Image: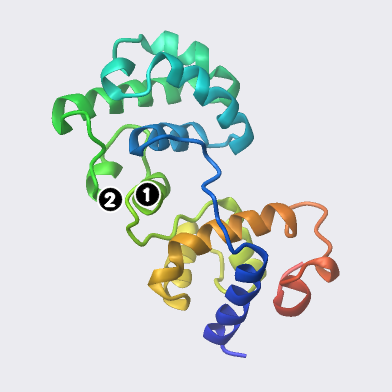
Amino acid sequence: MTPKRKAKEIAKILDQLYPETPIPLQHEDAYTLLVAVVLSAQCTDVRVNQITPLLFARADNPQDMIKLSVEEIREIIMPCGLSPAKSKAIWGLSKILVEKYNGQVPQSFEELEALPGVGHKTASVVMSQAFGVPAFPVDTHIHRLAARWGLSDGKNVERTERDLKALFPEDTWNKLHLQIIYFGREYCPARGHVKEKCPICSVYGEGE
C-alpha cells in the first residue's frame, strides 16, 4: 500500500471516530488561545484549563496582562511548570502586542514566531485554530504516531510535519491534527500500547 493510500484510509478511521474536533484548550479569542498554548508546553491540557481561568480573571488581554508583574503571572501559572520562562514570555509577548500590533495577535507565521516563547508549533496552533489558516502543528503525540503508522521516518518534528503535509489534503490539516491528538490519547499512548487493540496500528502500524 502506498503512503498516500494508507494516509487516506487512516483519515477515514479518524473521521469515523472523531467527526467533531473541539479545541482542547479553553479560550475566548486569539490572544487567550496564544497564552494557553504557551502554557501547554510540557503540561497537560487539563492542567492548563484549570489555570487559565485564574489568569484570565486577572488579565484576558495584553493591555491588562502587562499591568501585572512577571512575578504575579508566575505565581498564578506555577502549576503548569516552567513558570519562570513562561511568565516572562507571556508578559513579553503581551508588551509587543500592545506596542507593535495595537493589542491584536498578528496573523502570520513570521510575526507570531518572532514573539517571546512562541515557536513554530505554537504559531501553527494559533494560525489554524484562531485564524483558520491551514497548518499542521506537530506535537509529541503526532510525531510519535506518524512514525508508528509509517507515515514519516520520525527523525524530527520538522520532517514529520513536511511528510504529513505531503500525504494529506491541505483542507484537512486543521481538523486532522486534532483528530490524531485525540486518537493518540485514547487508543495509541506512548506507554502500555496494545497494538492489537488499536484501531489503526492493528491494521496499518509498523512500529511497536
Q: Residue under circle 2? A: 109
Q: Position of residue 61 (x, y in %)?
A: 32, 24
Vertical comparison of 185 with 198: above or below: above
At label 2, which amino acid type do we have? Phe
Q: For this view, does 109 lie left or right of residue 4?
A: left
Q: How far apart are marks 2 and 1 (CA)?
A: 8 Å
| Within-10-Å neighbours for mark 1: few <14, some 14–19, many 20+ | some
Query: Dividing the image into 4 quarters, which one contains the C terminus?
Result: bottom right
Q: Where is residue 10 in the image (x, y as percent from the top left)?
A: 62, 75
| Within-10-Å neighbours for mark 2: few <14, some 14–19, many 20+ | some
Vertical comparison of 200 with 75: above or below: below
Q: State if disc 1 and disc 2 touch (CB < 8 Å).
A: yes
Q: Residue under circle 1? A: 120
Q: Which of 27 and 199 is in front in this view?
A: 27
Q: Where is residue 84 in the image (x, y as percent from the top left)?
A: 46, 19
For label 2, the SS is helix
Query: Dividing the image into 4 quarters, which one contains the N terminus?
Result: bottom right
For label 1, the SS is helix
Which of the 4 image quarters holds residue 60? top left
Q: Which residue is drawn at 55% across and 23% down?
A: 51
Vertical comparison of 78 with 7: above or below: above
Mark 2 or mark 1, earlier in chain: 2
Q: Residue at x 44, y 25 (%)?
A: 86
Q: Which of marks 2 and 1 is in front?
A: 2
Q: Can residue 136 be seen in this view?
A: yes
Q: Position of residue 58 (x, y in %)?
A: 41, 13
